[in-house]
Image: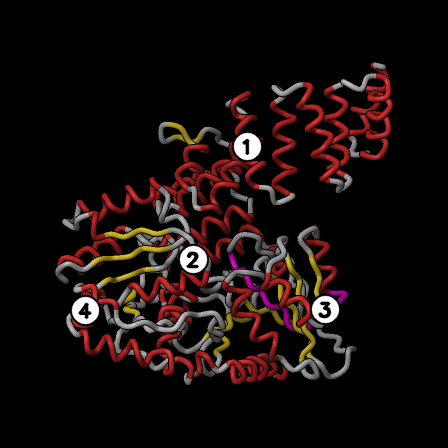
């Protein structure tokens, strides 16, 4: 028996799952209550993609040996892959009860908690007494991302820097750090541009051959889109109306998707592509080869330095023309990224030096907005019945920094009895709530005036605009889709753009919508505009009643023209 067990373990360690399972079956035929055999048979089934079998086998093992931390951990991993987050969380918790220093379980559990907005729990899982429980690069990066999501961007940046010192050649870690810096007002724009170029210096291949277009596929332009976000994500939401309107006789689209989970937007996007490839299982080398085989003329990066990016593919020069667009907030720093698709508002001539790519400007906006068909009707101005003005910011928690709180606190003090609703995933986290209320209280604003709400179904999120009067845009990372939705719901947005691309989304959308009167020159102007709006309810009511129709008639919502503009802009590059 021991010889069979040893042989099974040898096959398992060598990745020969089929052979290993056959031997574990022999062990179980001899001893049906062999807990390790059930466990390892489950591991083998998982390797072969039979996850439901794997769960059943490992659960048999745990029924015999419930205190096996490794078996509980493996069960949790598989349940997570099956999308059963509740059961996966319970299995991770059992693992940590049995082995508190099982740091891989801590890391995975935190990754399970973060998307649910349970950010304080995730942070506590990863650190103790303010210090990381593990100094591994992966662990530090997980902690840094949790801190960032909780709005503790300064701490997140420090953790990323510590991880970078330990792993300076980790390209994905470097990207995560750069993305975190976009939220950090302490990093000036020139330094941010320099740090992006450093990514190219550290991680791009030293010698990259040019790729010429063979153009053997007839007259149609072959455009590839590379993204982990072709689903229910702002990228997928903005891509859908474009894909619905591109002329297939002119453009053949190929989507290279790293989006693993099926959702309604993913299901709508798939049939619109000329060719759809799920590539999450492809290495960078394999994906580069596939793009070459597909004879792509223009390759779009829709991720930049966000999670799941494929910048290493673009650094290899996978296509003759490479363009970054929509998924990130500015240039990538890559020498092989030829263009940044933008507009005159995001990158005016005086800011071109901040980009390593050549700006490729769309004639109107760089995206178009398709309002949801289920958007609620615009309600009457809430201030008329409430007796006070309610400001709001329905943006990511990590956009709310100390400088933003300074300005918003001054504004709340200037507008008597006003309230501020902060709504997004994570604002219902107890630790996030306590921290934010304390920040405002130390600036003289009663915590009762700060209303905090977490994630809700999208229709309810849109309907929350019917409780507010004025939207406040954060800085230096402004709203994008959030701003479009606020305007559609009749809520004017006060914004204060700066030089960095991330701070100019609202400027672009509002300018294209013809709503420029609430674009501030500086922070004093921002406060002045918001105060004047709050003290002029008839003006707010007029905006409430007119913004949706104004937006609908503007270039921001002209989806057909956007598709024409996109096609002509891309063709102009290819034609030279």
Q: What is the distance, in whole Å, between disc 2 and disc 4 at their CAs?
A: 40 Å
Q: What is the distance, in whole Å, between disc 2 and disc 3 at their CAs?
A: 37 Å
Q: Which residue is mark 4?
A: 534
Q: What is the distance, in whole Å, between disc 2 and disc 1 at their CAs?
A: 44 Å
Observer-side mark, 2 or 4, equals: 4
> Residue 324: x and y, percent?
54, 67
Position of the N terminus, as image quadrant, is: top right
Q: Residues within 10 Å of mark 2 (few under 14, many from 20)?
A: some
| Label drawn at residue 90 | 1
Q: Where is residue 511, by image quadrant?
A: bottom left
Q: Residues within 10 Å of mark 3 (few under 14, many from 20)?
A: some
Q: Which residue is mark 2?
A: 194
Depth order, front residue of 373/347:
373
Mark found first going from the N terminus, 4 or 1? 1
Can you see residue 505?
A: no
Highlighted range, magenta: 292-305
Q: Residues within 10 Å of mark 4 (few under 14, many from 20)?
A: many
* Magenta segment includes 371: no
Q: Which residue is mark 3?
A: 275
Q: Residues within 10 Å of mark 1 (few under 14, many from 20)?
A: few
Q: Which residue is at 74% across, 27% downward?
A: 40
Observer-side mark, 3 or 4, equals: 4
Q: Secondary structure at mark 3?
A: strand
Mark found first going from the N terminus, 3 or 1? 1
């Amino acid at each position: 028996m021991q010889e069979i067990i040893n042989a099974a373990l040898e096959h398992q360690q060598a990745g020969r799952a089929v052979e290993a399972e056959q031997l574990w079956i022999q062990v179980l035929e001899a001893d049906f209550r062999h807990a390790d055999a059930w466990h390892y048979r489950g591991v083998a089934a998982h390797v072969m993609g039979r996850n439901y079998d794997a769960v059943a086998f490992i659960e048999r093992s745990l029924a015999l040996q419930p205190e096996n931390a490794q078996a509980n951990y493996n069960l949790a991993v598989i349940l997570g892959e099956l999308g059963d987050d509740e059961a996966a969380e319970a299995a991770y918790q059992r693992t940590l009860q049995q082995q508190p220093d099982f740091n891989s379980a801590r890391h995975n559990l935190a990754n399970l908690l973060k998307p649910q907005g349970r950010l304080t729990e995730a942070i506590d899982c990863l650190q103790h007494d303010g210090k990381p429980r593990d100094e591994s690069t992966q662990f530090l990066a997980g902690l840094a991302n949790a801190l960032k999501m909780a709005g503790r961007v300064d701490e997140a940046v420090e953790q990323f820097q510590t991880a970078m010192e330990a792993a300076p050649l980790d390209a994905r870690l470097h990207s995560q750090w750069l993305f975190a810096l976009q939220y950090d007002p302490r990093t000036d724009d020139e330094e941010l541009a320099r740090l992006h170029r450093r990514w190219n210096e550290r991680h791009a291949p030293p010698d990259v051959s040019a790729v010429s277009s063979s153009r053997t596929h007839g007259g149609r332009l072959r455009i590839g889109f590379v993204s982990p976000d072709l689903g229910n994500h702002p990228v997928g939401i903005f891509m859908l109306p474009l894909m619905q309107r591109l002329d297939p006789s002119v453009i053949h689209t190929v989507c290279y998707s790293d989006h693993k989970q099926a959702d309604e937007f993913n299901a709508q996007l798939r049939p619109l592509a000329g060719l759809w490839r799920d590539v999450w299982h492809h290495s960078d080398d394999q994906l580069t080869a596939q793009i070459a085989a597909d004879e792509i003329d223009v390759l779009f990066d829709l991720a930049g330095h966000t999670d799941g990016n494929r910048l290493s593919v673009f650094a290899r020069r996978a296509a003759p023309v490479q363009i970054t667009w929509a998924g990130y907030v500015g240039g990538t720093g890559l020498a092989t990224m030829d263009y940044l698709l933008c507009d005159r508002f995001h990158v005016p001539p005086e800011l071109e030096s901040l980009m390593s790519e050549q700006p490729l400007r769309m004639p109107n906006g760089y995206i178009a907005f398709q309002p949801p068909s289920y958007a609620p009707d615009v309600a009457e101005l809430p201030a008329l019945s409430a007796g006070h003005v309610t400001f709001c910011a329905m943006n990511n928690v990590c956009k709310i920094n100390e400088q933003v709180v300074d300005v918003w606190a001054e504004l709340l003090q200037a507008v008597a009895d006003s309230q501020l609703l902060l709504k997004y995933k994570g604002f219902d986290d107890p630790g996030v709530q306590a921290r934010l209320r304390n920040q405002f209280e130390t600036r003289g604003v009663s915590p009762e005036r700060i209303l905090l709400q977490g994630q809700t179904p999208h229709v309810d999120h849109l309907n929350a605009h019917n409780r507010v009067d004025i939207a406040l845009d954060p800085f230096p990372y402004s709203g994008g889709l959030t701003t479009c939705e606020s305007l559609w719901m009749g809520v004017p947005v006060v914004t204060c753009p700066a030089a960095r691309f991330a701070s100019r989304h609202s400027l672009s959308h509002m300018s294209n919508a013809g709503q420029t009167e609430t674009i501030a020159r500086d922070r004093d102007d921002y406060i002045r505009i918001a105060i004047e709006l709050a003290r002029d309810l008839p003006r707010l009511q007029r905006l409430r009643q007119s913004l949706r129709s104004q937006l609908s008639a503007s270039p921001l919502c002209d989806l057909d023209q956007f598709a024409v503009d996109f096609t002509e802009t891309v063709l102009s590059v290819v034609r030279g």
